[in-house]
Amino acid sequence: MRVRFAPSPTGFLHVGGLRTALYNYLLAKQHGGAFILRIEDTDRKRFVEAAEQDILDMMAWAGLAFDEGPGKGGSYGPYRQSERTERYHEVASLLVDAGKAYIAFDDDDALDAMRERHRTTENPTPRYDHSTRLEMLNGLTLSASEVQERLDRNEPHVIRLKVDPGHTIGFTDAVRGQVVFESETIDDQVLMKSDGLPTYHLANIVDDHDMCITHVIRGEEWLPSTPKHVLLYEAMGWEVPTMAHLPLIMSPTGGKLSKRNAEKQGIPVSVSSYVEQGFEPEALVNFLALLGWNPGDEQEMFSMEELTASFSLDRVGQSGVQFDMKKLLWFNEQWVRTRADADLADQLATEASERFGCTDRDYLVRAIGLMKERMVFARDLFSAPYLFQSPDSYDEAAVAKRWKAASAEHLLRFREYLASSGDWTVEALEETLKAYVEKEEVGMGAIMFPLRMALSGTGGGPSLYALMALIGKQETLDRIDTSLTALP
Ligand code: GLU
């Protein structure tokens, strides 16, 4: 099995593109095949300089290492289409010589005039096809010597595929089953543009053939292009690879997830935005794997290894799949929890030191251990500054609601219990608090809430025993003292 991801470097890598890359990668790994990255940069007008690097960076971030591609090499290179132009010319000439394609000299005015002549309400956008080609200036209407003269004069020209009417083009799609198109519906596609560069259609099939691609797995938006590709393969006498078109990714409010409607709903489209927001690569990969593929059971969490083992094209659905941001956040939360505290500490150390002057690694690891179950993103650690420093304010709404007349007194009295406690472990602190409520004959809440407020300034958070154990005895007592001067 040889599969490829073939992005056009027209902008930053899109999440939908990453899903396509992922599905290709998984199949290649599963079958011990090769995963190829090919840069389809024939559209010079839409070319974006930084895009290729972004594609490489984002694939590396997601863990999608390719076996052949730019910078990596391989036996079928080069892997950038702009470096393969000669071969496209060769194939285009073969097609012209075989009568499967023809040269056309029509300029924009001639094309507009043709459309003008044929425009009707039933046919609002007349095409350059079997019904109109004989009125145009091309190799079918000019003599061979006239064509040659024009070529000798360097007249701008294109090469078009000659699509004959009256037959059905069919292929079996690994996701959608049998797909058919009538050849009447297909125009005489431009294969080679007047700038001497191939169009997507030509370059794509030449490369898929020359790179021995066995399976073409891509988004559904390319389905209408496939009959043109099938015609080209047939014209060259080449075998058509297995085709698989992945379902569209839909916006939560319906319609295709376009850049505009996605961003309106707070869904970034470029993978780099997910990286910036602090998403775990495993979470995005896991989420995208299930955005179109269904494992057939209840399992939701999949590592790359598990995906490689379970993924299959026959469980990829045909209908569009909605992008559910809540689900992605859930995956992120789950994946953060699977990380070792020490590993998270490596990631967060610089920020902990810059923001809170925390350079004690052991302390940081313990703080992470305390917060991990409450994080959606790793950096949520810093939404609990009280792990590192005394609160500089107290949640006014919570105080107004839950701070009772007796709160300060409880805090003061409990402080004495703490001050005389020798053993400063989570278990011992829990015992101390139990002893307090028993002796004072009060409910847990009577002391828990004021204590939490004193230590963290907020009404919620991780276990108080664990928090006291983390910050230590002196800091606990100091925070209580500070709160007693600040709170009623
Ligand atoms: N260059 C096309 C893209 O940007 C590739 C489509 C295909 O995989 O054939 O998606």
Image: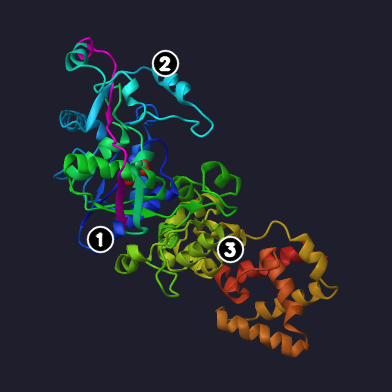
- Do tag 2 and tag 1 residues touch (Cβ < 8 Å)? no
The magenta-colored residue range is 150-173
- Which mark, residue 473? none
Q: Secondary structure at mark 1?
A: helix
**Alpha-carbon neighbours of circle 1 within 10 Å: few (<14), some, or many (≥20)?**
some
Q: What residue sits right under mark 1 in the picture?
A: 29
Q: What residue sits right under mark 2 in the picture?
A: 109
Which residue is the extreme one toward the left?
75
Q: What residue sits right under mark 3 in the picture?
A: 387
**Which quadrant of the view contains residue 316?**
bottom left
Taking the spot 83% from the left edge, 73% from the top edge, the residue there is 404
In the rendered structure, does residue 356 fall within the stretch colored magenta? no
Q: Secondary structure at mark 3?
A: helix
Distance between the alpha carbons at the discs numbered 3 and 2: 71 Å
Location of residue 255 in the rendering, given as x and y in whole percent from the top left corner: 55, 49
- N-terminal of the pair, mark 3 or mark 2, is 2
